[in-house]
Amino acid sequence: MDEPEYRVLVALTRTGQVVDALDDPGWSFEENLAWASLGKMTITVPLPGADRAGKLTRDTLRGIRNGMSSISLALVRRDGAVPWAGPVYTLGWDDGSVSIGCAALGKLFDKRMVLSPGYLTNPTNPAADVTLSLPPRDRVIRLLDLATTGTRRSLPLTLPALSGTAGDEVTYAGVDLRTTAEAVKAVVEADGGPDVLLLPQLSDDQSQLSWTAAVGDPTLGAYNPDATWDYPLVVATGDVDDSETTEVAYVVGDSSGSDSASRLIGVSATDRGEPWPALERADRTSVSEPRQTQLDALAASYGDEYGHAVETVTYTAPTDLAPAYRTAWNLGDVASFAFTGHPWLDDGTATARMIGVSVTAEETKFVTKAVSG
């Protein structure tokens, strides 16, 4: 029998040890460059018969159900590449199949507090505070390092080296109980913040699953000549959304007292002139941020992102059509899409940065952001 094109390996999340496998299940996954938009994967396994092979499959599925987030599933191609891997968070079953939902490894950092090692149970102690004097890229790396330090906090995650340069001093008060996910989100979403991807891989003998943190300075990826698709093998659709557009962007921060006048607010304003109407919006996802400089940076990034209507172009190609995701290209890369005779687009080649991907065994959808050139 031919080896299936894809299989799913079952690993222990905390150590990465591969303990089991599911051959040729149904699957789909999504991945995004944005830290706040967690990737996810769904695995569907038909319930087997009553023979010995069926019992082994049921034992594997029941082991996953009992382990949940202590178990991670890794989608593996025949060539050994790992397009996606992450911990189990949901499992549903009926009389025909079992459906397993996994989240990206980053979801674990939504349950890791930014606290000094040794003070996880004593966050009100001033010694629990974490003070970092690092540039944004290094701050992200150090936050991830702290989140994987301590009892049962370790993960098979390799972090890049720090640059050794100094940056603005930032203190994370223990009493704020800020999660690592929130702290990293504030860094990456600020103006000039770094891209962050947690990339899975397998050891050569496929016995160990691990992740490598790729942290941009500030961006990841570059023009990739291998990431090229031609119409009509690739289908393009577009969506222009003006609902979030703003000329004056506010980011609401911390209130240091009961008086609302003491609340910190970052502001970024532009004037598009006639015939555009005035548009103002406030982002309230940073209400615990106590630094005015950080709020100003968040407002600048917010205003830049939504200064005009956002056009999202989605390209769709057969999954088995090269180049393959996580082998020839990755999120952050700039790809090329050539069009001739398209009913909406002019003839020529569009260049776009890959910021999201949604993959099934049949088709791959690329979510992109236009770039010049």
Image (cartoon, rainbow, N blue to C red):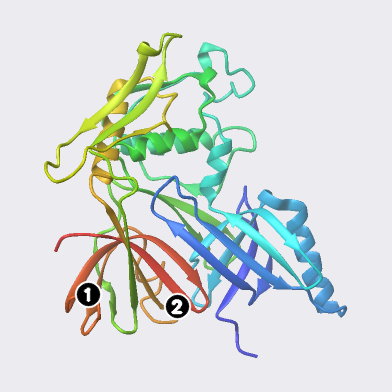
Q: Is residue 324 above or below residue 133?
A: below
Looking at the image, tell me whether mark 1 or mark 2 is earlier in sequence order. 2
Q: Which residue is mark 2?
A: 319
Q: Secondary structure at mark 1?
A: loop
> Residue 201, how many percent across, how many down?
49, 61
Q: Is residue 22 above or below residue 152?
A: below
Residue drawn where x is 25% and y is 80% of the image: 343
Q: Secondary structure at mark 2?
A: loop
Residue 291 quadrant: top left
> Residue 9, how many percent across, how many down?
63, 66
Can residue 217 be seen in the rendering of this structure?
no
Q: Which residue is mark 1?
A: 345
* Tags 1 and 2 touching, CB below 8 Å: no
- Tag 1: amino acid: Leu
Q: Which residue in the rendered view is the most extreme toward the left? A: 274
> Residue 140, how many percent across, how many down?
39, 37
The Cα–Cα distance between marks 1 and 2, rounded to whole angstroms, is 23 Å
Of residues 34 and 284, the one nearer the viewer is 284
